[in-house]
Image: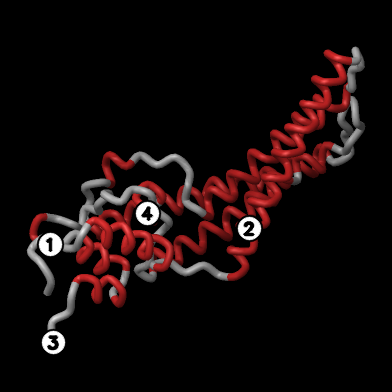
């Protein structure tokens, strides 16, 4: 019994879904692409919880930075009162939010990617590039973890000039986020090895985006 492109899209894996998408209407292409990008990979409850926690933490940090800077500006220019701790607190929060957001971006595979070369790669070549990219992320994360622990230990007894906080608290964000990046990277590596896909944000929001697997011979209609 012949199957339609929509049936294959619902029942197929990530690669076969993409092969069928090019034979259907643009609307189905968009819907199936979204399904492939989110449902074609597996996420554990732990990593999903970590992602939500990082998003919430980054949002709280950003809100705190805005309120602290706004408070400093209002007090300084309208009441001629300067609070020295506000600048230091905002600076520390900005450093912390950088690493928190970087860890969350690893989960969503949202760091900068150059798609000029991979756009025309075969599925097998694309898998090899994805594995290589994940290994690079794991290596960088391991460096953050290893040397983040070292710098935290060295600076643990040091205090900040104004608020007199222990600098070890600030530097501890580096190894913690490095460890979280390793967890996310290992999950992506496991999914790619099993034939799943990494999150591809560049095509998830583009209804007309195609994959190299959608070559000319795959545009002939349902099988």
> Label 3 vs label 1: CA separation?
20 Å
Q: Quadrant of the N terminus?
A: bottom left
In which quarter of the view is residue 97 placed? Answer: top right
State left or right for residue 127 relative to residue 74.
left
Name the residue beneath numbered marker 3.
Answer: 1
SS at badge 1:
helix
Residue 170 rendering spot, x and y as whole percentages? 78, 40
Query: What residue do we see at 90% from left, 31% from top?
Result: 163
Residue 91 rendering spot, x and y as whole percentages? 75, 29
Name the residue beneath numbered marker 2.
Answer: 52
Q: Depth check: 90 or 173 in front?
A: 90
> Label 4 vs label 2: CA separation?
24 Å
Query: What residue do we see at 39% from left, 64% from top?
Result: 192
Name the residue beneath numbered marker 4.
Answer: 130
Name the residue beneath numbered marker 1.
Answer: 218
Q: Depth check: 62 or 110 in front?
A: 62
Q: Quadrant of the C terminus?
A: bottom left
Among numbered discs 3 and 4, the one appearing first in the sequence = 3
User: Which of pointers 4 and 2 indicates the residue nearer the eye?
Assistant: 2
Mark 4 touches mark 2? (CB < 8 Å)? no
SS at badge 4:
helix
Residue 43, disc: none
> Label 3 vs label 4: CA separation?
36 Å
Q: How is the image coloured?
A: secondary structure
In which quarter of the view is residue 11 placed? Answer: bottom left
Mark 1 touches mark 2? (CB < 8 Å)? no
């Amino acid at each position: 019994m012949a199957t339609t492109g929509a049936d294959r899209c619902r029942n197929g894996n990530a690669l076969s879904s993409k092969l069928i998408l090019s034979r259907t209407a643009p609307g189905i292409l968009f819907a199936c692409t979204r399904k492939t990008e989110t449902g074609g990979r597996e996420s554990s409850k732990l990593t999903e919880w970590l992602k939500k926690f990082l998003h919430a933490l980054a949002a709280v940090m950003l809100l705190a930075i805005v309120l602290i800077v706004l408070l400093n500006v209002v007090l300084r220019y309208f009441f001629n009162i300067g609070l020295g701790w506000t600048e230091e607190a905002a600076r520390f929060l900005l450093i912390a939010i950088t690493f928190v957001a970087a860890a969350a971006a690893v989960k969503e595979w949202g760091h900068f990617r150059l798609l000029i070369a991979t756009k025309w790669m075969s599925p097998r070549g694309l898998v090899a590039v994805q594995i290589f990219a994940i290994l690079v992320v794991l290596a960088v994360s391991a460096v953050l973890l290893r040397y983040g622990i070292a710098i935290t230990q060295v600076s643990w007894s040091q205090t900040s000039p104004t608020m007199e906080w222990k600098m070890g608290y600030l530097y501890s964000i580096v190894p913690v986020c490095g460890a979280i990046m390793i967890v996310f990277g290992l999950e992506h590596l496991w999914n790619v090895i099993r034939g799943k896909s990494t999150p591809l944000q560049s095509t998830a929001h583009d209804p007309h985006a195609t994959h190299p697997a959608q070559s000319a011979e795959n545009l002939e209609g349902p099988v």
